[in-house]
């Protein structure tokens, strides 16, 4: 087994390699003067089971091209099997046609990864589970729920906790967490007038004197989270903490979070956090052991789904 990474999340790659007792594969990913990406693999991968870790986060297109070119380089070096390990799958929010003459970009990205030569994909908390069907190769969608539920049990009395979905579309995800920690469920009913802006309309469920845990897959501008936190506190919630898998955190999100009524925002390191993220109200959970265990089971042809039983 060989394990390589691009430039998007080297810290997570090193933690995974340490868990697997492996050395990161030797490769260079550099750019020419005109920003063309060039990849060179510096060790033999012929006949090897190769895993390439790369989150397609900001800068999304650069990181995506790095992944595609690394896959192609390894394929042309006669690797036996190539698994693209994508902790954060960019373009996942473009999984359907929201209007006429618009693309389904998530399907296009799936085609590009398959066309580059990947034999299977390992990813985490896809924005929509059906994106797995966009791939014509085996795709394992991991869930951060086990990592998050352990953290919740360490910091909260689950008897006084309510898991809150920030919108109706995330109810299934929130219910899975609520079931795991044996807590109640509430839902924020919201209306999104335009991308990146939302208005909270109503709270479905009892949150009076409860520690509310907002749970979602992506935090981008953080407008939804901050509005939801304020609405929950107005309904009598004792405190509001947000647990989010992917911390995209764009458009002044950090300032918005630090100035909000949120007690804390907890994110995973699926996207490598910048130094500013590590300050203020934001705390980071490592998913290295979860992804490493999934890689190990994939290499051994063992069940991955049993990780979540």
Image: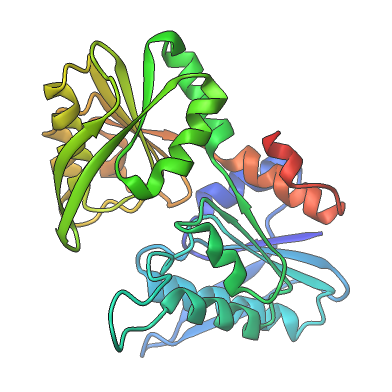
Residue at the spot 28% in from the left edge and 53% down from the top edge: 220
Does residue 217 appear anywhere in the picture? no
Q: 37 or 257, which lies in front? A: 257
Q: 188 or 132, which lies in front? A: 188
Is 113 above or below relative to 5?
below
Residue 104 in the image: state x and y as whole percent.
42, 79
Q: Which of the 4 image quadrants contains residue 306?
A: top right
Residue 44 in the image: state x and y as whole percent.
81, 73
> Relative to 8, is 220 on the left or the right?
left
Q: Which of the 4 image quadrants contains residue 206?
A: top left
Quadrant in which the N terminus appears: bottom right
Is 117 above or below relative to 96?
below
Q: 145 or 122, which lies in front? A: 145
> Relative to 91, is 212 on the left or the right?
left
Residue 269 in the image: state x and y as whole percent.
46, 44
Q: 114 or 170, which lies in front? A: 170
Q: Which of the 4 image quadrants contains residue 52?
A: bottom right
> Relative to 286, is 102 on the left or the right?
left
Is 135 above or below relative to 53?
below
Does residue 111 appear anywhere in the picture? yes
Residue 153 in the image: state x and y as whole percent.
50, 16
Is 36 above or below relative to 71?
below
């Amino acid at each position: 087994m060989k394990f390589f990474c691009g430039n998007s999340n080297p810290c997570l790659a090193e933690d995974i390699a340490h868990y697997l007792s492996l050395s990161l594969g030797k490769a260079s990913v550099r750019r020419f003067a005109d920003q063309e990406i060039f990849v060179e693999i510096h060790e033999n991968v012929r006949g090897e089971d190769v895993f390439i870790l790369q989150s397609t986060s900001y800068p999304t297109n650069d990181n995506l091209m790095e992944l595609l070119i690394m896959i192609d380089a390894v394929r042309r070096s006669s690797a036996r099997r190539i698994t693209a390990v994508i902790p954060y799958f960019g373009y996942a929010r473009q999984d359907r046609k929201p209007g006429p003459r618009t693309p389904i970009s998530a399907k296009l990205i799936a085609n590009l990864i398959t066309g580059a030569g990947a034999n299977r994909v390992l990813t985490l908390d896809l924005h929509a589970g059906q994106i797995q069907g966009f791939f014509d190769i085996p795709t394992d969608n991991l869930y951060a729920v086990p990592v998050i539920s352990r953290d919740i049990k360490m910091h909260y009395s689950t008897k006084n906790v309510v898991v809150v979905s920030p919108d109706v579309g995330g109810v299934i995800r929130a219910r899975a967490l609520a079931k795991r920690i044996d807590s109640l469920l509430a839902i924020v009913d919201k209306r999104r007038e335009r991308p990146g802006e939302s208005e909270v309309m109503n709270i479905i469920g009892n949150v009076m004197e409860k520690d509310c845990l907002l749970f979602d897959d992506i935090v981008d501008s953080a407008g939804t989270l901050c509005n939801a936190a304020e609405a929950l506190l107005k309904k009598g919630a004792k405190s509001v903490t947000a647990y989010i898998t992917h911390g995209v955190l764009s458009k002044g999100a950090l300032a918005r979070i630090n100035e909000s009524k949120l007690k804390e925002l907890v994110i995973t390191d699926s996207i490598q956090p910048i130094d500013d993220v590590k300050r203020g109200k934001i705390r980071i959970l490592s998913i290295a052991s979860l992804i490493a265990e999934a890689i190990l089971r994939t290499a051994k042809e063992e069940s991955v789904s049993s990780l979540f039983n």
